[in-house]
Image (tube, rainbow, N blue to C red):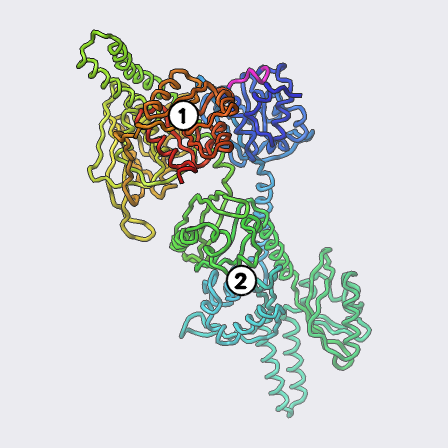
Amino acid sequence: MTSPALAAKLDFMPAHSGMAQRIAAFDWSSTPLGPIDGWPQSLRTTLGVMLDSRFGMCLCWGPALTLFYNDAYAPMLGGKEQRALGQPLQDIWSDVWDDIRPLVEQVLEGTPTLSEDMPLTMLRNGYPEETFWTFSYSPVRDEEDRIQGLLNITTDVTRKVQNERRLTADVAQLGRMFEQAPGFMAMLTGPDHVFQYVNPAYQQLIGDRQVVGRRLADALPDAVQQGYLALLDEVFRSGQAFAADNMRFVVQASSGGATAERFLDFVYQPISDEHGVVGILVQGVDVTARRLSDLALHAREAELQTLNSDLERQVVERARDRSLTWQVTPDLLAVVDPDGVIESINPAWEQLLGWSTEELVGHRWMARVSSDDHAVTRAVLESLRAGKPVLRFENRWHTRSGGLRTLSWVATPEGGRFYCSARDVTDINAAADALARSQAQLRTLFETSYQLQGMCTPDGIVTDANRPVLQAVGAGFEDMIGVALWDTPWFTGTPGMPARIRAMFERAVAGETPRDEIQLQLPAGLRCHDLSLRPIYDDGRVIAVVPEAIDTTDRRNAEEALRQSQKLEAIGQLTGGVAHDFNNLLTPIVTALDLASDPHARPDRRARMLSVARQSADRAATLVQRLLSFARRQPLQTTDVDVASLVAGMAELVESSSSPRIRLVLDIADDLLPAIADPNQLEMAILNLSVNACDAMPEGGTLTIGARNARALDEIRQTPVHYVVVSVADTGVGMDEQTRQRAIEPFFSTKGIGKGTGLGLSMAHGLASQLGGRLTIDSAPGAGTTIHLWLPVGTSHGAVPDNEGKTVDTTDSRGIALVVDDEDSVRMCTADALEDMGYRIVEAGSAEEALRALDDGLAPAILVTDHLMPGMTGAELARTVRARLPSTAIVIVSGYTSMADFDTGLTILNKPFRQHELAASVESANAAAPHAA
C-alpha cells in the first residue's frame, strides 16, 4: 500500500493512466534514477505531461537514457513491453539502435529532430518486421538548464505507407489496362456526366477533343444533338445498363467543321455504390468498317437481285463478297449444326485463340469452352434449337497457349444451321473490374483515414464526407450531403464559424489553399481542428474543393504545457534583474524606518523619507503583481486593453531584466486606440520579444518598444481595417532571409544549446493569430530586427478605478472585525487599520483558531482573512463562515493564487495593500453581504 507521504509525491502523475500506476509500483532503487522521492521536479513535470497525453510518447532520462512511456506507446513495444519500463533505451531498441543512434546523439546535443515515414526493421515480437514511423525527439532539460534526456512523440504509420504503395501499384496497373484496351473506353461521373477518364481509342473516336473534367453537354454538343445525353440520363436514373450495336454517330469535332460518320457497338454500364449510381462506364468498339462492309454487301445483294439476267454471275459475285467479309472481319464467325458441331469458321478464330481450322471444324462447340461455362452454353444451344435467336451471351474459351478469353456472342438459327458471331471482350471486362476494384480501394482509404475529409462542389455543396467527419460531428451521411459546407453540423454549433468557413471557401475557389486552426463546439466538447480547404483543378480551373482537418486538441494541450514551461524559463531569466531592483526599492524603505524611529530627526526630513519609502513600496507592489500575472496559467481572455498603459507599465520589468549596456526607449503614440487582447498574454509576448531583442545585442544597443495606430487592407473583404501595432525593435545583429522565414517555427532558435526553447516568437505569432491579427518581421543582417504585433482595435478605452483619497466613516463602532492571519506583523497592521475604521478587533493566528472563536459564540460583522495559511485556507474558512453566518461580510487577502480557488461574491484584496484600499474592500464586502440588500 502506498503511504500518504509517497502518494503526495506521486500526485504529479495522472490517476487515469495505467502506466502511472506501473511507474508508482516499480522498484526504481535498482536503476540509476533511484527512488521516486529523489527525482527532480523537471523529471516529474515532463512525466506528468507525457502520461496525460493520448499520443504515443516515451521519455528517456539520465546517462543510461532510462525508459518511461505512456499508455499509447505501450502497444508499439510489442513483445518487449513486459520488460521495457526502467531499462536503457539502447537495450530495448537494440535492433534499430544503429538507425536511431545519430538522432539520439543529435538531440542530446540540443537539436530537436523530426523524422517522417522512417523505415525501421524491428524484432519487437521475435521476428523481423518492416515498419514505418513518424516521430520527433526533443531535448529535456533539468532545473539547471542541462539536457538530461529526450522526449519522443511517435506514430506508427506502417499501415499508411503500405496502403499508399498498394494503391500506387493498383492505379498504375489500371492505367496501363485502360490505355492499352483495344476498344474505346470512358468514365463519366455524377448526374452531369463529367468525363473522369478517357483512353486513346475514345480520344481518337471523338476527334482528339479535350474532354476530361468537362460535362458531356459542354464537351460533345454533337453527341447531345443525336440523343446520346438522353440515353445517359436514363441509365443514371434507372441504374440499368444500355447496349447498342451498329449505332450511328456523326462526329463533328468543331462547330461548322467537317463531319465523319461512325458506327459503334457499345454499352453504358452504371457504376454504383451504397448510395446509388455514381457514374457510367462507356465501353465499345468502332465497327464502322464492318458496318460499311455490311452495307456494301446489302447494296450489292439488292443490285444483284435486279440483275437476274446472269444468275451465275450473281451467285459468284455474291459468294465472293461474302467470302471477303468472312475473311477480313476481326469478329469470330462460325456455322454450327443442331448437334453443336462446328461446320465452318473464319480466320479470326486462329488469330485470336490459336486453334487451326482442322482443330475446330468437325468438333463439338463445347470442347473448347471452359467447364465453368458449360451450363450457360448448353442453354443457348437449346434456345437456338427452339428457333429463338440469341442476341447476347458470354462464355470463356480456352486458347492454344493455355489461357482463357471471354467472347460475347450473337447467334441466330436459319435453315437448320446456327450462324454465330463473337467478339473478344476479355480486356474490356478486365478493365471494368479493375476500375471497380480501384474505386472500392480508394473508398476504403477515404473512409479509414485518420483525417476528417470531404468533397464539395465549387459552390460549396457537400457531395461526400468520410466516417471520421460523421463521428466527429455526430451526424448521419444524409445530414451532410447536399448542404453547403458552412451550414453543416460540423460548423453550425459554433457561433460565428459559418461565416468564417464561407470566407475560407471563397478563397479556395479563387485558387488559394487556406488553412486555419479553429475551435469548434462538437458533441464531444470543445475541439481544435487544423482545417485546410484544398482546390482540385482540371484543365486549369477549380472543379471541386476538398475540406481536410486533423483534430489537434491533444497536441494543443501538450503545447500549452510547453508554453507554461516557457513562462518559467522567462521568469528565470528575469530573476537577477528583479532581485537587483528589489534591493534598490528596499534601501529607501529601510532608511526611512530608521529615520522614523529617531526622535531627534528633523520633521521635514522624516516626511520626505517616508514619502520616498511609500513610493518605493508602491513600485515594489507593482513589480510583484506583474510577475505574478505573467506566471499565472490561464486561458486566452480577451478584453479592451489600454496598450499605452500596459507598455509603459512593462518598461520597468523589461529594464530590470536587461543589461546595463542596453538603453530602453518607449515610442508610444499620443492618440493610441485600445486593442482587443489578453493583457497577461500580451505582457508575456512583449517580455519574450524584449528578451530576444536583448540577446541579439550582446555588445549593447538600443531597445525600442513602440505602439501606434495603423490601417491595412483585409485580404478577404478588400476593405481597410484598423489595428494597434506594438513593435519591439533592436539595433542588434539582425537576421538573414532564411532565418527570418523560419523565425516563427516552434522550437527554432539561433541562440545555441541551453539558451532558449525557440517558443518565444512562435507563442507571440500564435497570440496575434488567435486575436485576429498577425505578426510581421523586418530584419536584415547587421541592420537590427523589428517585430510588429498587429492587434485588432477595441471598442472603448479601459478605465482603472481610483479609490485613493476616499474616506470612510469611523465615528461610531461598526461591530466586531475578526482578523485572521498567520503572520503576526500583517495581522497587527490590518487590525490597527480596521480599529481606525471603528471596528472592535478579535485576532486569530489560524483558520482553526477563528472557528473555535465562532464555536464560543463570536458573531463578527466582518471577517478579514489571509488565504494561504497552514492548515485550512482562507477560501475554505470563508466558505464555512458564509454557511454558518450568512450576514457576515468577508474580505480575503491574497498575495497570489488563481481566482478559481474562490467562491463567487467574495471580495478579494491583493497584497500588498494601503489603508485606503483596505477601507474600499471593507465597504465593498459590506455592500455585498445579505444584510445590506
Magenta residues, start to end: 34-40
Of the pair 923 and 591, the residue shown nearer to us: 923
Which disc number belongs to residue 31? Answer: none
> Looking at the image, which residue is at 57% across and 69% down?
286
- Location of mark 2 (residue): 189
Q: Where is the C terminus found, in terms of image quarters?
A: top left
Q: Residue 680 appears at what percent x and percent y?
A: 36, 33
Callout 1 crowding tier (Cα within 10 Å): few <14, some 14–19, many ≥20: many
Disc 1 is placed on an element classified as strand
Give the amino acid type for the residue marked by disc 1 in the picture: Ala
Q: Position of residue 114 (x, y in %)?
A: 49, 32
Percent across and percent down for residue 853 are 49, 22
Q: Can you tell which quarter of the image residue 805 is in?
A: top left
Residue drawn 61% across the image and 16% down it: 31
Residue 302 is situated, as x and y percent measured from the top left of the image, at 61, 87
Q: Residue pushed farthest front?
A: 812
Q: Which residue is drawn at 79% across and 77% down?
A: 385
Label 1 sits on residue: 817
- Say what amino acid the circle numbered 2 marks: Thr
Say whether residue 80 is left or right of residue 668.
right
Q: Can residue 2 be seen?
A: yes
